[in-house]
């Protein structure tokens, strides 16, 4: 995906794939509670569907989908931004762009029907191509089978298989050697560890599995939060605040977006002395992420 292709994607569909629902429709304008301020009560974030741009009245900033992702992820890395957009656009839109939102029925003009993937089966990993892909990432099949499934799905008459990692919305983050995206609503994945006041935070599931492989463990001693995209960092932090957590261990990437994500975790913890954050990324110093270090 290039920047021209990214900017052509309808913004309201992009936000719908991320799970953001419009609160009001006024002509061509869709109004949302700001994705940058999850606790906002009065919608201040507007999308102009005619111009395909957004504007946040609370912050006084706006722009295209590229500007939105860079503001949300606190990054200016264009390659990472485009990868995030391609990842999110790979998931089918949810009810936000075709159904109801808090009693608000969206007009048919909003819904541009697309062919959504249809899951045909979710089983234990047995496909040889997927097994080879898991091993190419440095992950043992025994460990992968504890956390991942083999998802067979159909798009029109075309059938595919991918590794699936369940998220909290009931969807799957799916990967194979040629595709990275989501089926169902894109969301975080929180794996609780009963009684633990510690949480390990990862951007993607391969990083999580890589750290388990490094320490030769099948399970984590702490809760685990896999954000599945740093664009969902605020949602992840909101989930963490529902837990009695005293310590976070951050295994985010060694890039600008990872550093911004770490800063956001620290800021959230410092607001009320809720938790302290340990930067655990020293484990893979010299590598972009934990999986690159392992593989």
Image: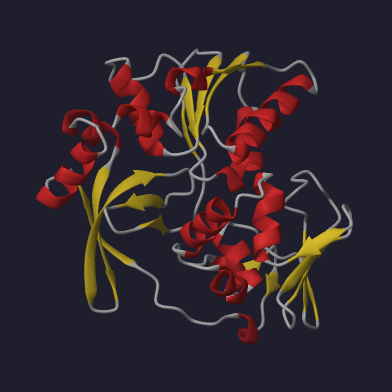
Is residue 174 rendered to the left or right of residue 263? left
Looking at the image, which residue is at 40% across and 71% down?
A: 116
Is residue 157 rendered to the left or right of residue 67? left
Q: Position of residue 239 (x, y in %)?
A: 61, 34
Q: Position of residue 167 (x, y in %)?
A: 44, 44
Looking at the image, which residue is at 21% across and 45% down?
A: 133
Q: Nearer the viewer, residue 36 or 241?
A: 36
To which quarter of the image does residue 214 belong? Answer: top left
Position of 54 relative to 146 (above/below):
below
Q: Is residue 63 visible?
A: yes
Position of 193 relative to 83 (above/below):
above
Is residue 104 rendered to the left or right of residue 58? left
In the displayed orientation, state which residue is furthest to the bottom: 109
Looking at the image, which residue is at 54% across and 82% down?
A: 112
In the displayed orientation, state which residue is furthest to the front: 286
To which quarter of the image does residue 230 belong? Answer: top right
Position of 1 relative to 143 (above/below):
below
Q: Position of residue 215 (x, y in %)?
A: 32, 15
Quarter of the image for the C terminus: give it. Answer: top left
Q: Nearer the viewer, residue 102 or 201?
A: 201
Q: Nearer the viewer, residue 146 or 82?
A: 82
Q: Position of residue 175 (x, y in %)?
A: 32, 51
Colouring scheme applied when the structure was drawn = secondary structure
Position of 52 relative to 142 (above/below):
below
Q: Is residue 44 visible?
A: no
Looking at the image, which residue is at 62% across and 72% down?
A: 7
């Amino acid at each position: 995906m290039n920047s021209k292709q990214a900017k052509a994607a309808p913004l309201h569909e992009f936000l719908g794939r991320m799970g953001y629902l419009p609160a009001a429709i006024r002509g061509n304008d869709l109004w949302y509670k700001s994705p940058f301020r999850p606790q906002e009560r009065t919608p201040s974030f507007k999308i102009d569907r005619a111009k395909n741009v957004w504007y946040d009245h609370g912050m006084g900033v706006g722009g295209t989908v590229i500007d939105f992702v860079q503001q949300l992820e606190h990054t200016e890395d264009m390659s990472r931004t485009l990868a995030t957009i391609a990842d999110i656009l790979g998931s089918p839109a949810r009810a936000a762009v075709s159904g109801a939102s808090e009693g608000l029925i969206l007009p048919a003009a909003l819904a541009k029907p697309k062919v959504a993937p249809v899951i045909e089966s979710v089983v234990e990993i047995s496909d040889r191509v997927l097994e080879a892909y898991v091993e190419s990432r440095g992950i043992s099949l025994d460990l992968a089978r504890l956390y991942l499934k083999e998802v067979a799905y159909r798009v029109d008459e075309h059938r595919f298989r991918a590794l699936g990692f369940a998220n909290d919305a009931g969807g799957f983050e799916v990967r194979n050697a040629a595709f990275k995206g989501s089926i169902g609503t894109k969301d975080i994945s929180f794996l609780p560890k009963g009684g633990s006041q510690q949480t390990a935070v990862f951007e993607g599931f391969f990083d999580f599995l890589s750290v388990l492989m490094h320490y030769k463990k099948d399970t984590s001693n702490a809760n685990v939060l896999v954000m599945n995209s740093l664009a969902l960092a605020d949602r992840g932090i909101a989930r963490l605040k529902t837990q009695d957590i005293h310590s976070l261990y951050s295994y985010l990437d060694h890039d600008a977006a990872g550093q911004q994500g770490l800063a956001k975790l620290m800021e959230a913890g410092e607001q009320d002395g809720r938790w302290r954050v340990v930067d655990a990324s020293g484990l893979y110093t010299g590598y972009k992420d934990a999986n690159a270090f392992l593989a």
